[in-house]
Image (cartoon, rainbow, N blue to C red):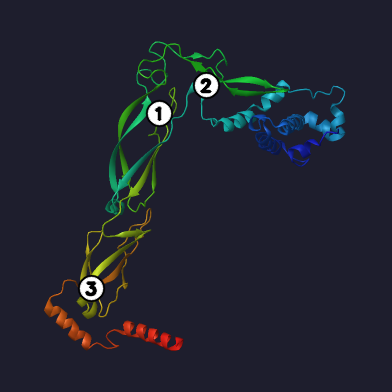
Amino acid sequence: MSKRDYYEILGVARTADEAELKSAFRKLAMKWHPDRNPGNEEAEVRFKELNEAYQTLSDPQKRGAYDRFGHAAFEQGGGMGGFSNDFGSSMSDIFEDLFGEMTGRGRRQQAGGRERGSDLRYNLEISLEDAYRGKAATITIPVAISCEACSGSGAKSGSKPKPCATCGGHGRVRASQGFFSVERTCPHCQGRGETIDNPCSNCGGSGRSTRERTLSVNVPSGVEDGTRIRLAGEGEGGLRGGPPGDLYIFLSIKAHSVFQRDGADLYCRVPISMVTAALGGEIRMPTLSGDEKVVTIPEGTQTGKQFRLRGQGMPILRSRDVGDLYLQAVVETPQKLTSRQKELLREFAGHSSSETQPESDNFFSKIKEFFSNAS
């Protein structure tokens, strides 16, 4: 069976440069690696093809010979039996990325076992007034910080971590799989490259201890529900003296008893007496700014009528603009009327006309017309 073209195997043009070859190999190696395809014989064959193709094309001399003579250049013991040391070195970063992504570790760990601390989340609930004006909030959170007793090393005072005997301090060990070899995280030191014979009694060798920390959070005006505030370096302390993570404050805004928010605008349902709605008048409306606005209600105002107060809504974050406040009139029907009030209403009803109740008369006229046509 004839061998496939190396450029075809990697899916690149014959003019591809070193970066394109490396990118193509990494992408396909992650797809066909045996660890991701257990028991899949096709994946094993594909992965061997990829390694063979990349080994040849990543070497300028071998690539030149292949471009001139094809596969014949490496027949008769031409050197395709396995990885050379140079090839293993040039591919170490590729396999580090590959296995880091597969195990979820990536390149987070640093030399000497130092590892960045985790990011933390804190949920902070504020009022709509706080979101309007801004607020300096104080929070207290339990966090893991660098152990003071061992300065984050994890080793007892007077001792030091030692290089791991299994991996020689590299944090990774090489294992053979068929005709190629790969690197994995050292199982003895879990990739730290160090071991501790005398762990710190205060932190148990982790290099961290838990304490409560009080922080000040500046909540700017105009924040919306779900706004995230990042406090760099205020997260969990790193292992073995590694850098700390970040703290993320997630804001939620309490429901307000009067106003409803939609972006930068505020909405409010305002009950208006039947008399005010009919004859007109004025109402006084407090705002989040602390001012009181006088709103004129015209004669004949109906339920649903909106009144707009410009610039009385929410401030827009990182802007000088401000939203508006919308008042929606809700005409209130009187209840528990006295005999005299009922008498006056009946008298009013007796004198009502299409001019006093245009919508009602228009609606029932349409109803009457509909049934007349139906019959």
> Looking at the image, which is closer to me, 159 or 342?
342
x, y (%) of residue 4?
Answer: 81, 36
From mark 2 to mark 1, how far is it between C-alphas?
A: 19 Å
In the image, what residue occupies the spot 30% across and 73% down? Answer: 303
Give the residue type at disc 1: Gly
x, y (%) of residue 214?
Answer: 29, 34
Question: Tag 2 or tag 3, which sits nearer the N-term?
Answer: 2
Mark 1 is surrounded, within 10 Å at the Cα level, by few (under 14), some (14 to 19) or many (20 or more) other residues, namely many
Q: Quadrant of residue 354?
A: bottom left
Determine the secondary structure under disc 1. Answer: loop
In the image, what residue occupies the spot 18% across and 81% down? Answer: 345
Give the residue type at disc 2: Gln
Pointers 3 and 2 in contact (C-beta within 8 Å): no
Q: Is residue 87 above or below residue 136?
A: above
Question: Tag 3 or tag 1, which sits nearer the N-term?
Answer: 1
In the image, what residue occupies the spot 71% across and 21% down? Answer: 85
Q: Is residue 160 above or below residue 262?
A: above
Q: Which residue is mark 2?
A: 190
- Residue 237 is marked as 1
Give the residue type at disc 3: Thr
From mark 1 to mark 3, how far is it between C-alphas?
A: 63 Å
Q: Which residue is mark 3?
A: 333
x, y (%) of residue 111?
Answer: 52, 23
x, y (%) of residue 311?
Answer: 31, 64
* Side of 237 where 13 appears, left or right: right
